[in-house]
Amino acid sequence: MNYTIYLTDDCNMDCKYCYEKNMHVKNQIDIQFVKNIIDMEIKNKTKQCIITFFGGEPLLKKELIYEISDYINSKKCKTKFLYNITTNATLIDDDFINFVKNNSFISISISIDGAGETQNKNRILKNHSGSYEMVKKNISKLLKVTNIPVAVPVITKNNEKDLFQSVQDLLKIGFKKISFQYDFTANWNDQDIEILKGEFTKIANLYMEKMREEKEFEILEIDEKIYSYIDENKNVNDNCSVGLRGVNIGTDGKIYPCMQFMYDSKYEIGNWDKGIDKKLQLKVHKELKQELDECKECTYRRRCNHTCSCINKAFSGSPEITSPFTCEIQRMIIEISDEIAEQMYMKKNPIFIQKYYNSSYKFIENKILKGGN
């Protein structure tokens, strides 16, 4: 089982599109909650457990992160614990960078929208000042010791026209991987879809350019769609297990299936003391993993993330209903991804062939792309 742990509900920023603002109170999780979950995984002889530090801003509670790691290391167990973190990067310091170097981190998600004005439009500090210079300085230090950080820009109506430029800026900072999120508080319309189509087309062309230059560059949404184009057995909806492979633990010590259902008693599936209630877990999973009848007949059914209850609830207000915006965005990215995949295949681009057709690619990826920017 994988756990996303809300170390605190507090945050040191005041992002304009934040969906957690009403949760930003100075709660923090009791360390005993986490220790008990760790003990359960060890007792169950779990081979591997991924712990994601989340919030709020998890680095407000660095001491908890270090204490959790020390506790795991003291166990000398056979269970392999790996770490992720999602952070706004404002509190990254030398101590934390050393911690990353010395522990088994597999991903660091950095909430950053782009450079300069793009970042400072929405991602502001509590004193209403911009965060870009601080974030850039900290990320630059981090990227010197690891290439695992993923940039996670939020696309919203006041930055959608700058999306391609933002991607270029993120590459200049040193990111190799980008994964987009959307502002689900925005009132999206057809005009926005057209703007985003133009921006994603330019991003896709840049993606091909980097492939030709044999430079490491991943747009996770594009990668996913290309994999599902090539492999007819791949269903991207399998990526969302909503409470089966991974769960969230709130500062209240209760267990929930995913982030959109935090602190809603209707979706509680366990707690820190007794662990996961298997009957509740399966019941909630079945309730949340629904599919609209019209989606069942869609050509892109297995390639569209339409059964992700978290995305559905964020955009439509209901975990069972896929919003028209989600439908159009998924369709757009699939069509753009298919077009560039066909072009790169026809040209027998060596990196493309290795990445998408060689099952050993991930093992040899660093050697293939050694020296790439």
Image (spheres, helix red, strand yellow):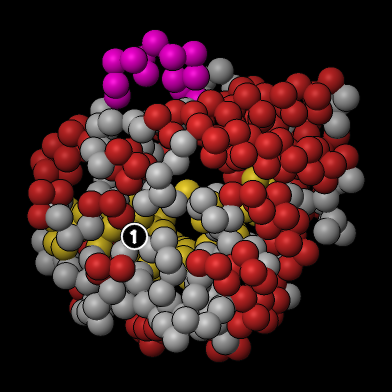
Work out which quarter of the rendered image holds the C terminus and state it.
bottom right
Q: Is residue 313 above or below residue 227?
A: below
The residue carrying pointer 1 sits among few (fewer than 14), some (14 to 19) or many (20 or more) residues within 10 Å by Cα, namely few
- Please give the range of residues in magenta: 291-303
Whether residue 52 is visible: no
Residue at position x 31%, y 68% from top? 21
Residue at position x 15%, y 55% from top? 264
Q: Is residue 185 above or below residue 345?
A: below
The percent coordinates of residue 40 (x first, y second) are 23, 63
The percent coordinates of residue 321 (x first, y second) are 28, 31
> Residue 89, located in which quarter of the rendered image?
bottom right
The percent coordinates of residue 260 (x first, y second) are 28, 51
**Element type at mark 1:** loop
Q: Is residue 350 above or below residue 242?
A: above
> Residue 72, located in which quarter of the rendered image?
bottom left
In the rendered image, the residue lying farthest to the top is 297
Q: Is residue 299 magenta?
A: yes
Whether residue 155 is visible: yes
